[in-house]
Amino acid sequence: MKLTGLFLLVTLALLLAIAVSSDPDPLQDLCVADLASGVKVNGFTCKDTSKVNASDFSSNILAKPGATNNTFGSLVTGANVQKIPGLNTLGVSLSRIDYAPGGINPPHTHPRATEIVFVLEGQLDVGFITTANVLISKTIVKGDIFVFPKGLIHFQKNNAKVPAAVISAFNSQLPGTQSIATTLFAATPPVPDHVLTKTFQVGTREVEKIKSRLASKK
């Protein structure tokens, strides 16, 4: 009975590990993404191994700060499978986020990944909101780490007078991002005004104003 119980516990643990993992585990040493392939699969098809080289696994895309002279005062530079084909099937990716003084990475979610940020420079007010509408937030500074659970709405705001930057890591080769404001107010085709006015308890004029501002920033 004890062995049976132990077997069941081990089996349950393995099933749970599979269920909560983000991307599926690879079944081969490598599967460099063939981004030009017309074949549609859950991920990307593999490049012929004879054509694989070191450049498929390396990049300096995160080496330099990004331009933050935009509406939100921030820029996300992704190092995912679309930029580094060798990440295909490996279940990890990075981003660099740069913030101008007062800049914000607006509330958003990553539907396919948990995110962990490491502060390179500056300080940030960060937080996420649970499904019970509880805000978990903190001010983080150079050298600090903060975790945003998979799928939960979260944000980062630079309230200092100097620039800030972080490196973000994800447990997905392509975590995806849905900005709450842009998703609702700049969708194509647009979300009907009556849905937004009812949801946010505002008038049509306010909704149209927000739509026009966000549409011009896409």
Image: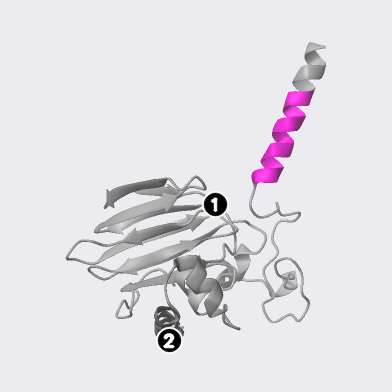
Sequence-first disc among 1 and 2: 1
| Residue identified by numbered label 1 | 150
Q: Nearer the viewer, residue 213 or 90?
A: 213
* Residue 10 covered by magenta stretch: yes
Q: Quarter-wise, where is residue 54 in the image?
A: bottom right
Q: Which residue is mark 2?
A: 212
Asked whether, in this view, residue 174 is left or right of residue 186, the answer is right
Name which residue lies at 82% across and 12% down: 1
Q: Label 2: state its secondary structure.
A: helix
Indicate the position of residue 82 as horizontal and vertical percent values. 58, 73
CA–CA distance in space, label 1 to label 2? 30 Å
Q: Amino acid at mark 1?
A: Lys
Q: Indicate yes or no whether the magenta region holds residue 34.
A: no
Image quadrant in which you'd find residue 181: bottom left
Magenta segment range?
A: 8-20
- Estimate the x, y position of residue 135 in percent, counting from the top left: 39, 48
